[in-house]
């Protein structure tokens, strides 16, 4: 009960901190955009009216020719900051939080928060094709990690507090208290799984953050939508089925392109500080033809909702944005993938609407949810987030249809691909997370000691996490090493009894010392049949 009371107080506190962090980050971002894009490049993109912006694009006397220089400069400064002071602040941020949850006990270095905030404000403010989701997630998660460390919390509590912090920051930046609470507990896993024990606290923190943030910015959602946006005919749902199927295909392409570009940049033998500048330069060159790809692009999404773009432009921007945000973030630039993915989905929905002469606003909004929900494998959270961000509650049912179709198609099409999701650090489910079975391994070690097998039960929590993450053995008292193997469905050992000797055919010095099956720990017996999903201590 005491632990629960502490977490409730933590949620209230981090809700306030998350809202204030979002305000500071937005303030820095606006300053950077005013300096880099507006003043240096002479270009002002359209902004959201509900954020005090105007749906007007302003191009200065130099045209768009200075944009490549400005985006390259922003990438250079961001790269210097990140790779000099906090290399883990590179990229889109949310993935680093997911990795910290699963593999580092929720620990994030204190310096990550200020470096991520400044580097992301410069990247996005100079026109880098990225969004605010990743940065604010990592910033407020880092604040949560610092708070947990200062208050001497356990690794288990720190992991929960990191999720609470992430939810609070996202809620404030996107004005979506329910959706972001679900996002924090859903983004951890690639299957339809949730970190359910954290949901109460992420929900509380998100609501507090939303309320506090609204005192500064008002209570309206980010986007404005028509009043008569709902589907009024059963035949109208057909087009949302089409949109869901198309979104599943695009959602499969997104991670493939994103991580292929990252692998390409990693293979280039130049200092990492320089790579974001190269990515920025290439984005700037694209922007000379299509300036809509710059920054998050929410103003252009509002234009799409309003019906202000053409079919050809929708199609061009769909693919240009995929390339642009991959160049920005995968080169090491600091920014999120949520806003660019929403942009891509909006362009897809708008293109389908224009192609078949359909009402545009609904398909644009649902396209936003369907593409990101599939590409990031967070269908429930995205459905709720986009609904709250637009106030388009009349679209909840058709959006649910399209998002679920997109998710199912994406899972099917990406099953054989190396990169299955925009969040590489996701694990399939709780049973695959070191955060959940470190304790089980420690129990197995105690069981082994009881049966006089020489395995030290004094192995520390972080040492076990390192073992489970890297596969490097932990030394035992008799000179041998303990390691762990997860039995995959395609393994030739799956479905065979231990006595079949499957493991020993390869290395005759291996010995199975325990089998972790769900919550059950089994001592080896010749007749035990190994199953896919078993974690085997060797």
Image (tube, grey):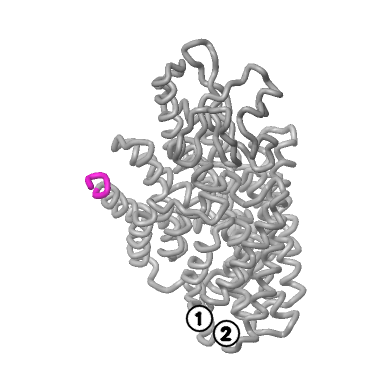
What secondary structure is found at the residue carrying circle 2?
loop
The answer to whether residue 330 is left or right of residue 434 is right
Residue 48 is situated, as x and y percent measured from the top left of the image, at 53, 71
Mark 2 lies on residue: 231
What secondary structure is found at the residue carrying circle 1?
helix
Residue 437 is situated, as x and y percent measured from the top left of the image, at 46, 37
* Mark 1 residue crowding within 10 angstroms, few (<14) / some (14–19) / many (20+): some
Q: Is residue 66 visible?
A: no
Magenta residues (range): 1-5
Tell me if residue 219 comes above or below residue 394 in the rendering: above
Q: Mark 2 to mark 1: distance in Å?
A: 8 Å
Magenta stretch: dominant secondary structure? helix
The answer to whether residue 5 is left or right of residue 382 is left
Tell me if residue 494 comes above or below residue 445 in the rendering: below
Mark 1 lies on residue: 394
Residue found 67% across the figure and 62% down from its top: 409
Q: State the image quarter where residue 204 is shown.
A: bottom left
Q: Is residue 317 magenta?
A: no
């Amino acid at each position: 009960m005491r632990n629960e009371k502490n977490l409730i107080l933590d949620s209230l506190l981090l809700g306030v901190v998350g809202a204030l962090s979002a305000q500071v980050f937005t303030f820095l971002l606006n300053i950077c955009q005013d300096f880099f894009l507006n003043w240096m490049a002479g270009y002002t993109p359209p902004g959201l009216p509900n954020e005090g912006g105007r749906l007007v694009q302003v191009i200065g006397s130099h045209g768009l020719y200075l944009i490549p220089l400005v985006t390259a400069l922003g990438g250079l400064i961001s790269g210097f900051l990140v790779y000099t002071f906090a290399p883990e602040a590179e990229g889109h941020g949310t993935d680093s939080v997911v990795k910290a949850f699963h593999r580092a006990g929720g620990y994030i270095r204190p310096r990550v928060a200020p470096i991520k905030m400044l580097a992301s404000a410069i990247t996005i403010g100079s026109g880098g094709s990225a969004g605010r989701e990743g940065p604010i997630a990592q910033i407020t998660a880092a604040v949560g990690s610092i708070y947990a460390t200062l208050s001497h919390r356990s690794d288990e509590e720190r992991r929960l507090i990191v999720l609470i912090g992430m939810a609070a920051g996202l809620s404030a930046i996107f004005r979506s208290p329910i959706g972001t609470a679900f996002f924090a507990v859903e983004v951890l896993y690639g299957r339809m799984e949730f970190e359910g024990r954290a949901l109460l606290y992420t929900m509380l923190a998100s609501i507090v953050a939303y309320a506090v943030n609204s005192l500064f910015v008002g209570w309206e959602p980010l986007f404005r939508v028509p009043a008569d946006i709902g589907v009024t005919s059963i035949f109208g749902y057909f087009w949302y089925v089409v949109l869901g199927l198309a979104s599943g295909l695009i959602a499969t392409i997104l991670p493939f392109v994103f991580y292929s570009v990252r692998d390409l940049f990693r293979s280039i033998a130049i200092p990492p500080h320089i790579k974001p500048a190269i990515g920025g330069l290439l984005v700037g060159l694209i922007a000379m033809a299509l300036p809509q790809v710059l920054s998050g692009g929410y103003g252009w999404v509002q234009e799409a909702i309003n019906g202000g773009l053409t079919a050809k432009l929708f199609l061009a921007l769909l693919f240009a944005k995929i390339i642009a945000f991959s160049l920005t973030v995968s080169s090491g630039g600091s920014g999120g993938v949520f806003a660019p993915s929403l942009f891509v989905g909006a362009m897809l929905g708008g293109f389908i609407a224009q192609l078949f002469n359909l009402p545009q606003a609904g398909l644009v909004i649902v396209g936003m949810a369907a593409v990101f929900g599939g590409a990031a494998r967070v269908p429930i959270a995205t459905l709720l987030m986009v609904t709250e961000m637009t106030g388009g509650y009349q679209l909840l049912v058709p959006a649910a249809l399209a998002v679920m179709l997109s998710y199912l198609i994406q899972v099917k099409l990406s099953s054989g691909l190396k990169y299955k999701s925009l969040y590489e650090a996701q694990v399939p489910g709780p049973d695959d997370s070191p955060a959940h079975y470190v304790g089980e391994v420690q129990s197995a070690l105690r069981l082994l000691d009881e049966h006089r097998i020489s395995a030290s039960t004094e192995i520390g929590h972080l040492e076990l996490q390192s073992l489970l993450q890297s596969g490097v053995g932990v030394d035992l008292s008799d000179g041998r090493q303990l390691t762990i193997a997860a039995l995959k469905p395609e393994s030739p050992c799956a479905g065979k009894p231990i006595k079949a000797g499957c493991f020993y055919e390869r290395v005759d010095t291996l010995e199975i010392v325990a089998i972790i099956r769900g919550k059950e720990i089994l001592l080896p017996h010749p007749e035990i049949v190994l199953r896919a999903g078993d974690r085997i201590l060797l």
